[in-house]
Image: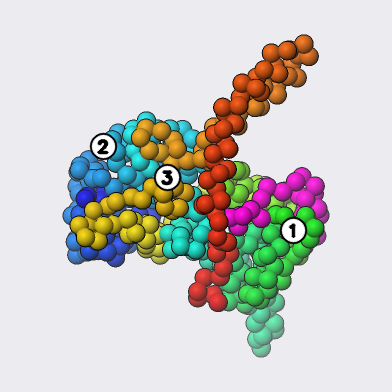
Amino acid sequence: MKVAVLKERRADETRVAASPEVVGKLISLGFELSVEKGAGAGASFTDDAYKKAGASIAADLSTALKGAEIVLKVQAPDAAERAKMSKGTIVIGSLNALTDADGMKALAKAGITAFAMELMPRITRAQSMDILSSQSNLAGYKSVLDAAAEYGRAFPMMMTAAGTVAPAKVFIMGVGVAGLQAIATAKRLGAIVTATDVRPATKEQVESLGGKFLVVDPEMEKDAQTEGGYAKQMPPEYFVKQKAVVAEHIKKQDIVITTALIPGRAAPVLVTKEMVASMSAGSVIIDLAVEAGGNVEGAKLGQVVTTSNGVKIVGHANVPGRLAESTSALFGRNLLNFITPHVDKDNGGFVIDWDDETIAGTLVTKDGKVVHPRLLETKSKPTPKKKAAAKKASTKKAPAKKAPVKKAPAKNTPAKAVATKPKAVATKPKETTVPPEEK
């Protein structure tokens, strides 16, 4: 079976879906590997390194895809790539499935069987396949280095003959994988670190790394975490309290790193313009959520903005891609660990167990249809909104009552979606566990 590793075509994407090491391991499992010329250049993987691992180097996209049954990608295939893929091709990568409905429909229309690795269930067995954790871990590390590069002072306290340099005060907002790694990195550099998160369970993790936890509202935070370990969308009154607590704290900070993301939704605004205005000249804010709308008012994707009061707001695009060699190596291992359990060791074939939690949890398109429950849920949501609008428009609408009745079939779809979720998230997540080197 032929596996194609394609060159990424998004302007700011430097990663590649498989390193030479991973390519060698796939070949040892019985796959034939074709790597598009220059695919690993952005991650410092040469074509010669792939050749030595046993892959053939394809001159262009068409050659790489010819006869390929599995395609490995970092980003979702674009229109040109989809057009050259045969019906039934399996695509595995980070597809932004929850936010790119049109892209998922296009994959389905092309007859592609697509697995969105960012939807990997938070179960123990799937930890080694979890691209969100592997990429976020390094993004958290890089965010501190980026802050240090923009900051005009030292991180640690330094006592010299000429006087004492005070340590930097670093505030981390959002304590997931990226946040924990940012805390650990900032502490290693000698900063005084505080952190906050809506999930109270993270308090102990912050303190275990030597940071201090900033509490907003203990009562409201009791129910702030999903079964899968992600942060829930909090009510408006929570954000009012959060703003008051954070506003007082942030004015004393030198560096702020925001990491708050909610899967499938726009990133919540955590740092307002007023908060930015209260910070001292030379302070630095790193917005790791800028690609999802941003946690910081005034942040701009792909830019470093300096405000009128001298605060730098950093909005780098694709932060994992700023450490392309390391992130590509981990991304490739995630895909390898996803594929390996479905390889028939006797004949080397690829036999998918469609009932496997990691398969069912990531499968987004199959047989010309969008099939993932969460995407079907999203699809059905606009209809109730229309009905509500119709009710308000007129009081004499007897038919308006029939509309909800008529919707019974539409409600069945979400019901199925909910039914499948417990399978995918049954086990407690490890996403907030400190990486081995941080323990």
Circle 3: is it few (<14), some (14-19), or many (20+) Cα within 10 Å? many
Task: Measure how far apart labels 2 and 3 are at the Cα level.
Answer: 18 Å
Q: Are marks 2 and 3 in contact (CB under 8 Å)?
A: no
Residue at coordinates 54% horizontally, 39% vertically from top-left?
416
The residue lying toward the viewer, choosing from 66 and 314, is 66
- What number is the disc on residue 257? none
Residue 86: image tag: 2
User: Element under label 3?
Assistant: strand
Which of the marked residues, 1 or 2, is nearer the chain's N terminus?
2
Q: Which mark is residue 363?
A: 3
* 269 horizontally vs 315: left or right: right
Seen as rendered, the residue at the extreme bottom is: 161
**Amino acid under label 1?**
Lys
Residue 309 image offset from top left, x and y in percent:
71, 54
User: On the image, numbered disc 1 is attached to which residue?
Assistant: 222
Q: Residues within 10 Å of mark 1 (few under 14, many from 20)?
A: few
Quadrant of the rendered structure where residue 195 is? bottom right
Residue extent of the magenta highlight:
225-249
